[in-house]
Each structure stands twice: as structure tokens, then as C-alpha cells.
């Protein structure tokens, strides 16, 4: 349950770094496998493919839009009017009349711009363009600014979270204010699949390494959005609700933190 009273599926498909046809195929595979949550962004240039895959799935399955959770994100922080225009353009590309969740993709731009962008998101929510609103890559200082200003707080902060990047300070700040953590790169982009601790835990549970990393995120209470363009891996990544890591496994994974940056790192920008 998010702080605005709405719910978000704890597992979703991330679609960063996919071509249009790959995105369409991956989203169709995910929706067909009962994965109802998809994480896209203006920056991924595939909102249209996500929207088309959802529309075709709805038409073929007879299910309702309300059963699915689609997130997108604002690419450029440039002020109030620009934010509303960019959100409307994203909705237009996706062929949707609302996103379930719309995020400010990064804190870049400084405090004054961040304030205006957030004011636009609050108004967009009132207008029904986004059911819920949140942030991404916000550090402790950026969240502190919002708390100090007394504005409506984001429902989620989507940050890079995996055993080698735990962002404990940001996690604590979010948890103190009831802001859910959404883990991007929950598989650490596959960069650590040879780590002996991970290999050992996967062997112990007879599960694959991706599944162990996703359990780690889920058991910390994070929402996980692994990316895969492979229908088989999309299904196996979602097959993580029938086993659990024990305290020893969690502690061993927790101890791997090394501030590994897998993509960008903007949590400390001005
Ligand atoms: N807010 C932000 O700034 C931000 C930044 C980055 C990402 N994100 C979001 O988070 C999502 C996930 O993060 P990510 O894409 O960076 O990385 P990730 O999910 O940690 O890793 C994706 C990589 O792992 C591979 N993979 C997936 N499942 C696998 C499996 N079962 N076994 C082996 N390899 C597997 C994928 O290859 P295949 O496709 O070939 O399976 C891909 O190369 C993104 O798609 C995006 O939605 C947000």
C-alpha cells in the first residue's frame, strides 16, 4: 500500500534499453504471464510500444485497464508548464489517459526547478493524468527539501538497489516518511552473477541467481522491476514467491555493499 492509499504490485517488468519490437514482445509476454506492472519512461523511447502491447493484450484477453499498473517518468526537469506538457505527450505516445504512477526521473536541475516540477505533478494528479506521483534517484537532501517544504510527499523513490548498492541512508529516510522503495537494477545488471556468496546461496536453494537477488529485494520490502527481453527469463524472474531466503542468506548478501554504480549516480546532485 502506498502512502496515498493506492496499491502497487511488488513485482514489475522494467523496459529500459529495449528496442521497440523487443519492448512490444517483452510486455506481451509479461502481461500474458500475469505480470501486471510495467516500468517505462520518456527516456526509454518505448512508451508507444508499451501502450500498444497493453492495448492488444486488453483487446485479446478481455481484461480491463484498471487491472494493470503502468509507470512512466519525466525526462527533463524544466519547470511547471513544461512538466505538464511532457506528461501529456507521454500519455499521448502510450495511448493512455492516465499513468498509474508518474515519476520525476531525477533530481537534476536544482531546488527551484524541483519545486516547480513537483507542483506540476501534484496538479497533474488532481487532474487525473497520474493516479500516483513519485520520484526517482532522489537522495536524502532532495527528500529533506520536500519534507521541509511541507508538500505532498512522493509515494515511491525509485533508486538503484541491490546487495552491492544498498543506499542505506536513502532507504532509512524513505522508510521514516512512508515512501516505498522501488529497486532499479535489482539484478545489478548481471554484473555480479559470479559472486561466490550469490552462487552459494543460489546452489543452497536450487534457484537461479536472478531469483535470489529478487528475493533479497522483495524481503527488504522493495518493489522490484527486473528488465528482461527474454520471455523465458521474464517468467522465471517472476517465479519468486514460492521460496524465501533465511536470515543468514540475507545477512551475507547485505554484507556485499560496495557502492557499485551500474548506470548513473545522481543522488547527490545540487
Ligand atoms: N530510474 C532510473 O534512473 C532507472 C535506471 C535504470 C533502470 N531503471 C528501471 O529498472 C529496470 C531494471 O533495471 P536494469 O534494466 O538497469 O537492470 P537489471 O534488471 O538489474 O538487469 C537487466 C539485465 O539482466 C539480464 N537478465 C534479466 N533476467 C535475467 C536472468 N534471469 N538471468 C540472467 N540475466 C538476466 C537482462 O538481459 P536480457 O534482457 O537478455 O534477459 C539485462 O541485461 C529498467 O528496465 C528500468 O525500468 C530505472
Image (cartoon, rainbow, N blue to C red):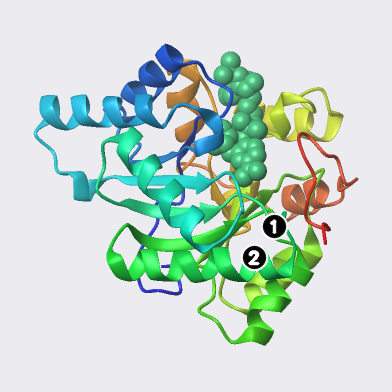
Label 1 C-beta lies within 8 Å of the nearest ligand 1 atom: no
Quadrant position of residue 220? bottom right
Is 130 rendered above or below residue 76? below
* Residue at the outermost right position: 258
Is 202 left or right of 178, judged from the image as shown? Answer: right
State the SS at label 2. helix
Is 249 rendered above or below residue 170? above
Q: Position of residue 67 (x, y in %)?
A: 22, 47
Q: Identify the mark nearer the N-term, 2 or 1.
A: 1
State the SS at label 1. loop
* Residue at the outermost front position: 81
Say whether marks 2 and 1 touch (CB < 8 Å).
yes
Q: Nearer the viewer, residue 203 or 256?
A: 256
Q: Nearer the viewer, residue 103 or 231?
A: 103
Q: Position of residue 145 (x, y in %)?
A: 71, 77
Which of the labelled discs sits on residue 114, or is there none? 2
Q: Which residue is mark 1?
A: 107
Amino acid at each position: 500500500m502506498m502512502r496515498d492509499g493506492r496499491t502497487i504490485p511488488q513485482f514489475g517488468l522494467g523496459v529500459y534499453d529495449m528496442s521497440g519490437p523487443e519492448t512490444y514482445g517483452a510486455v506481451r509476454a509479461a502481461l500474458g504471464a500475469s505480470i501486471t506492472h510495467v516500468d517505462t519512461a520518456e527516456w526509454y523511447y518505448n512508451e508507444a510500444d508499451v501502450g500498444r502491447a497493453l492495448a492488444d493484450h486488453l483487446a485479446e484477453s478481455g481484461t480491463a485497464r484498471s487491472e494493470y499498473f503502468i509507470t512512466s517518468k519525466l525526462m527533463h526537469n524544466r519547470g511547471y508548464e513544461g512538466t505538464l506538457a511532457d506528461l501529456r505527450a507521454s500519455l499521448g505516445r502510450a495511448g493512455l489517459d492516465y499513468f498509474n504512477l508518474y515519476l520525476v526521473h531525477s533530481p537534476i536541475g536544482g531546488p527551484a526547478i524541483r519545486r516547480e516540477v513537483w507542483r506540476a505533478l501534484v496538479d497533474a494528479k488532481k487532474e487525473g493524468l497520474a493516479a500516483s506521483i513519485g520520484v526517482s534517484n532522489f537522495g536524502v537532501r532532495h527528500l529533506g527539501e520536500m519534507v521541509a517544504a511541507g508538500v505532498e510527499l512522493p509515494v515511491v523513490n525509485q533508486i538503484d538497489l541491490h546487495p552491492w548498492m544498498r543506499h542505506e541512508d536513502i532507504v532509512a529516510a524513505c522508510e521514516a516518511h512512508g515512501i516505498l522503495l522501488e529497486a532499479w537494477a535489482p539484478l545489478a545488471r548481471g554484473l555480479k552473477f559470479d559472486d561466490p556468496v550469490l552462487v552459494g546461496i543460489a546452489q543452497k536453494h536450487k534457484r537461479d541467481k536472478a531469483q535470489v537477488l529478487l528475493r533479497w529485494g522483495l524481503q527488504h520490502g522493495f518493489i522490484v522491476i527486473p528488465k528482461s527481453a527474454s520471455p523465458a527469463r521474464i517468467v522465471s524472474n517472476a517465479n519468486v514467491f514460492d521460496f524465501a531466503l533465511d536470515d543468514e542468506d540475507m545477512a551475507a548478501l547485505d554484507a556485499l555493499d560496495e557502492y557499485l554504480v551500474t548506470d548513473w549516480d545522481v543522488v547527490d546532485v545540487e
